[in-house]
Image (tube, helix red, strand yellow):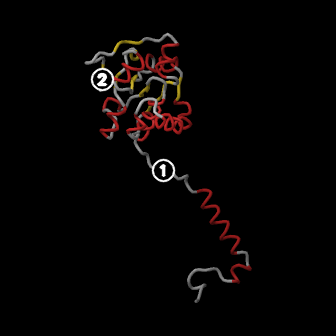
Amino acid sequence: PNFAAMGAPTRAFQRKGGMKIMVAAVLSATLLAPTLHFSYVPPSEAELKAKSPAMLARAEQVKPQLGQRLISPEVASDLIDLGGALLVDVRTKPQIMRFSKGRTFKGALVSPLDRWVEAGKPPDAFEDRKVVLACTFGSKSMMAWEFLQEHGIDAYVIEGGYEAWVEEGLGTELVYLGGPRSA
């Protein structure tokens, strides 16, 4: 076969350093190519189950991506009070009842991640707002942050969740079957 006609380098091309140029071009294209990103996969039912090994494993995968979006309760409080951010408890009401004796963050909108996953989108109330996400310890909030990133929402996660919030002496309130605020 005529390899030169098929685009393969000829011996003359190789002798003249052409092969080095071609290799350099391929390496440059490879090194400068954008990093591959895998498409987002919403949390599974097992990952949404509180404190499950699947939830904890997913949260550990997400945590390094958070960077400065993982904030202390004090910073979260300032972001809410001074910056107008929306505080969202991403737990289901049964999880709130079980893990924090029916209490949530004072002023929080209770909006379970489970509902967003089911709907395939976050609530409309999140559009054009900074959102501070919280749960009991932080694992579910990290998955919620990942979900919101996929939908272009500016979000933060309270490191340590409800437990850290209470430790800092920040306000809480009871969740009633009909409220407080939910979406």
Q: Mark 1 = which residue? A: 38
Q: Residue furthest bottom?
A: 1
Residue at (35, 13) in percent of width and height: 174
Between residue 105 and residue 46, name the one nearer to us. Answer: 46
Disc 2: which residue? 182
Could you say which disc has been placed on residue 61 in the image? none
Residue 116 horizontal side relative to residue 51, left or right: left
Relative to 128, say whether 74 is above or below: above
Residue type, numbered disc 2 = Ser
Which residue is located at x 73 percent, y 75 percent?
A: 17
72 or 112: nearer the viewer: 112
The tag earlier along the polypeptide, 1 or 2, is: 1
**Where does the image place residue 32, in percent across and percent down from the top left?**
60, 56
The local secondary structure at tag 2 comes to strand
User: Which of the 4 image quarters holds residue 2?
Assistant: bottom right
What type is the residue that disc 1 sits on? Phe
Which image quadrant is residue 180 in? top left
Q: Residue at x 57, y 57 (%)?
A: 33
Q: Is residue 47 above or below residue 27?
A: above
Q: Residues within 10 Å of mark 2 (few under 14, many from 20)?
A: some
How many angstroms separate mark 1 from mark 2 (CA)?
Answer: 32 Å
Label 1: few (<14), some or many (≥20) within 10 Å?
few
Asked if the residues shown at circle 1 and circle 2 are in contact, with their CB atoms under 8 angstroms apart, the answer is no
Q: Quadrant of the N terminus?
A: bottom right
Residue in the image at 52% along x and 12% along y: 168
x and y, in percent, of residue 81 in the image: 44, 16
Q: Count every numbered label the image shows and give the total.
A: 2
Question: In the drawing, does residue 183 fall left or right of residue 65?
Answer: left
Q: Position of residue 30 (x, y in %)?
A: 60, 60
Q: Quadrant of the C terminus?
A: top left
Q: Is residue 12 above or below residue 121?
A: below
Q: Is 56 displayed left or right of 44 in the figure?
A: right
